[in-house]
Image (spheres, rainbow, N blue to C red):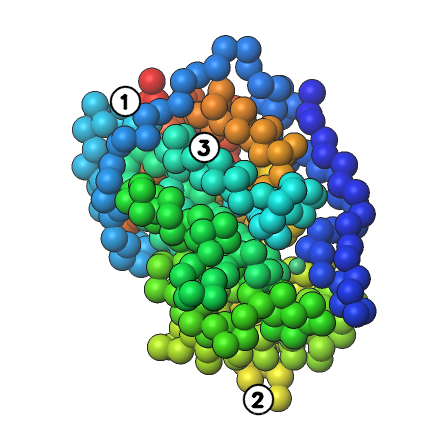
Amino acid sequence: MIRRWIRGLWGLTLGGVLLSCGQGTATQAPQTQAPTATTTVAASPTTAASPTTAASPTLAATATSEASPTPAGLSDADLAKYAPNEIGWVLVLEYHLIESPDADYSRSPENLRKDLEWLYANNFYPITLRDLVDNNISVPLGKSPVVLTFDDSSDGQFRYLDDGTLDPTSAMGILQAFAAEHPDFPAIAVFFPLIDVDVKERVLFGQPELATQKLQEIVALGGEVGTHTYTHQRLDEADAEQIQWQLAFSIKELEERIGDGYKVTSLSYPLGMFPEDESLVREGESEGESYTLSAAVDVTGGASPSPYSQNFDPYHIRRTQAVDSQLEYWYQLFEERPDLKFISDGDPDTITVPSEETLGEEQQGRLRPDLEVRRYERK
Ligand SMILES: [Zn+2]
């Protein structure tokens, strides 16, 4: 039985600005390539792999799909122990407000911390969207990439207290504290801020004098800043000129604040709504300001296919909303079917995938034909 999530309408209009990221109504199955049977959680849980595997991430060289892979040099014992599966599914989690109590678009600080604990215990390792789409997934051997995304730049996502210290209940406070306790889980996250909306608590994290510092800090920690447009405008209702203005000038603002040649390359569609002419997402120009984007995230979809899958669309990367009803589904599925997770071979320059025969049927026949891939018999 495919569990289906019925989303309610959620839209908060304050001062005429619609701030919700949520799509109006979307009913969705977890994964279109997953046959019905696979989404039924099996009766016998498989114990999750130990989180103690590798401590040091391999630093990434830029890998292109055309490059000839260097053999990762994994022994048969390594392959048996870690069972790398780089055609496996990737969790891209979607957070909005970080505040109590939990609601459709709010995650409490306590539950964000619990999410991190679950991810860590199940061998996940945070990466950016940029690295996901650039074939540059650099996580330690045996770990699974996860992308932590935060839309709408509410103050609960990143807040400094009056004494100048980071608010430990804000998302960034939680991420940094967790990273300090777990050096093999860095505070890497992807933020999609708003620049001009009427709710001041959601303009660049709500503390104007600290906005630039916060953006720079996200990047300095290895994270990513993407665009969520300038004013949270629905791109399905905007004309070509408006779309290009929204993207060009939000990107310009963010890049100027971050400085140091930083390039914004990712977009989160406001309310998940995208323009009919999707070429305007990829590149465009407004009043002499040009932009190029290489990734865009949806608001629904469940786990993302691997970027090495034919099902992967970098301009419609699926996300899992960080609410109990969805997280519990994926947590349970991955605990019981860890073979469906993307599991890294520890080398961003190589792609390692079990043989077709030893892949789960949900992932058979999906590998992009243009890639050089090492196959092995998964035990
Ligand atoms: Zn939004």
Residue 112 in picture, x, y percent from top left: 52, 42
Residue pointed to by mark 1: 80
Locate the C terminus by quadrant.
top left
At label 1, counting other C-alpha atoms closer than 10 Å, the crowd grade (few under 14, some 14-19, many 20 or more) is some
Nearer-N-terminus badge (3/1):
1
Say which residue appears at 69% left-offset and 20% top-offset: 1
Question: In x, y percent, where is residue 66?
Answer: 35, 54
N-term mark: 1 or 2: 1
Label 1 and label 2: CA atoms lie apart by: 54 Å
Q: Residue at x 31, y 41 (%)?
A: 182
Of badges 3 and 1, nearer the viewer stands 3
Q: Which mark is residue 118?
A: 3
Looking at the image, which residue is at 28% across and 37% down? Answer: 141
In the image: residue 241, left or right of residue 9: left
Q: Quadrant of residue 268?
A: bottom right
Check if mark 3's residue and mark 1's residue have beta carbons within 8 Å.
Answer: no
Q: Secondary structure at mark 3?
A: helix
Front-lying residue, 216 or 165? 165
Q: CA distance from mark 3 to mark 2?
A: 46 Å
**Mark 2: secondary structure:** loop
Q: Return the mark for residue 156.
A: none
Label at residue 288: 2
